Image (tube, rainbow, N blue to C red):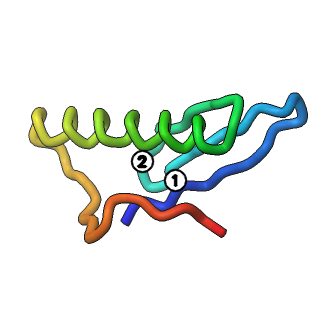
Amino acid sequence: MLRIELEREDDGRWIAEIGSLPGVLAYGDTREEARGKVEALALRTLADRIEHGEDVPEVGAFFVVAA
């Protein structure tokens, strides 16, 4: 499971981050936009790691939003 941390910035934008994948973060105008962008980036990052023979975290379900 990849835990998504969502936070609203002072300027109103949302930032979504997956702590177990360093560098995987994305901004959006809405919570949903930020979540969608970070999920897409996480999948691209995981695919790239697999393609290059790098370690990937074991996941049962892919995403869960932190409460």
Q: Secondary structure at mark 2?
A: loop
Q: Position of residue 51 (x, y in %)?
A: 10, 34
Q: CA distance from mark 2 to mark 1?
A: 5 Å
**In this view, which residue lies farthest toward the right?**
10
Q: How many marks?
A: 2
Q: Is residue 55 left or right of residue 5?
A: left
Image-quadrant location for residue 63: bottom left
| Quadrant of the image containing the C terminus | bottom right
SS class, disc 1: loop
Q: Which of 55/51 is in front?
A: 51
Residue at 84%, 33% in the rendered image: 12
Image quarter for residue 39? Answer: top left
- Is the Cβ of the residue at disc 2 closer than 8 Å to that at disc 1? yes
Occupied quadrant, residue 62: bottom left
Left or right: 55 as drawn, with respect to 7 = left
Q: Quadrant of the N terminus?
A: bottom left
| Residue found at x 10% / y 41% | 53
Q: Nearer the viewer, residue 11 or 46?
A: 11
Residue 19's mark?
1
Tell me the kind of residue under disc 2: Leu
Establish if 62 lies above or below 14. below
Q: Give coordinates of residue 37: x percent, y percent.
A: 49, 34
Amino acid marked by disc 1: Gly
Point out residue 61 in the picture as x, y percentages from the top left corner.
31, 67
Would you call the spot at circle 2 few (<14 residues within 10 Å), some (14-19), or many (20 or more)? some
Q: Which residue is mark 2?
A: 21
